[in-house]
Each structure stands twice: as C-alpha cells, then as structure tokens.
Image: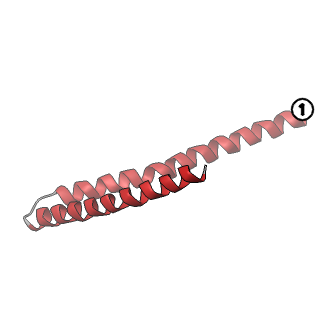
Amino acid sequence: MKLKNLALLFLLCIISNFIHAQCAMCKAAVESNLDSGGLKGAGLNDGILFLMSMPYLAMLIFAIAFYYNKKTNNASRKIL
C-alpha cells in the first residue's frame, strides 16, 4: 500500500513539471497574439472563468439537494 502511494506521489510530481511548462507556453502564445491585435486572450479568459465556475455550481447543486433532502426527512419525522 505504501509503495502505491509513493509511486502515485512520484508520478504526480513528474506530471506537475510538464503542466507548469505548458502554462508558460500558453501564456507566451496569448501574449504574442494580444500584442498583434488578436482576440484569443479574451476567449481564453472566458474559458478559464467557465471552468472555474463549474465546481462552485456543482457545490451549489449539492447543497440545495442536501437542504431539500434534510427538509423532507424532518417533515416526515414530524408526521410519525
């Protein structure tokens, strides 16, 4: 079990270096596009905001479902 955890940690460390390198490449491509008058940077920012909003939306839906589930369970207990 410890060997699997160690292997996973090692793999994540290796992958994070590749991810960081890709971020620098995207940033350079967007900056050069914006300098030349392109609009790719605005689209990239919209995409980032869209991806960032999804976890919050999922948490909101879960919280609403939890609230209504708890409310119906409390209502059914009062009847009995």
Where, quadrant-wise, is the C terminus in this rendering? top right
Amino acid type, callout 1: Ile
**Image check: 51 left or right of 40?**
right
Residue found 60% across the figure and 44% down from its top: 62
**Image check: 79 left or right of 44?**
right
Q: Residue furthest front?
A: 3
Check disc 1 and report the residue beneath it.
79
Counting from the top left corner in percent of width and height, residue 73 is at: 79, 37
Counting from the top left corner in percent of width and height, residue 15 is at: 37, 56
Counting from the top left corner in percent of width and height, residue 11 is at: 42, 54
Q: Residue furthest right?
A: 80
Residue found 37% across the figure and 51% down from its top: 50
Picture colour scheme? secondary structure
> Does residue 80 lie above or below 74 as drawn?
above
> Does residue 6 lie above or below 69 as drawn?
below
Residue found 7% across the figure and 65% down from its top: 36
**Image check: 74 left or right of 14?**
right
Counting from the top left corner in percent of width and height, residue 60 is at: 56, 49
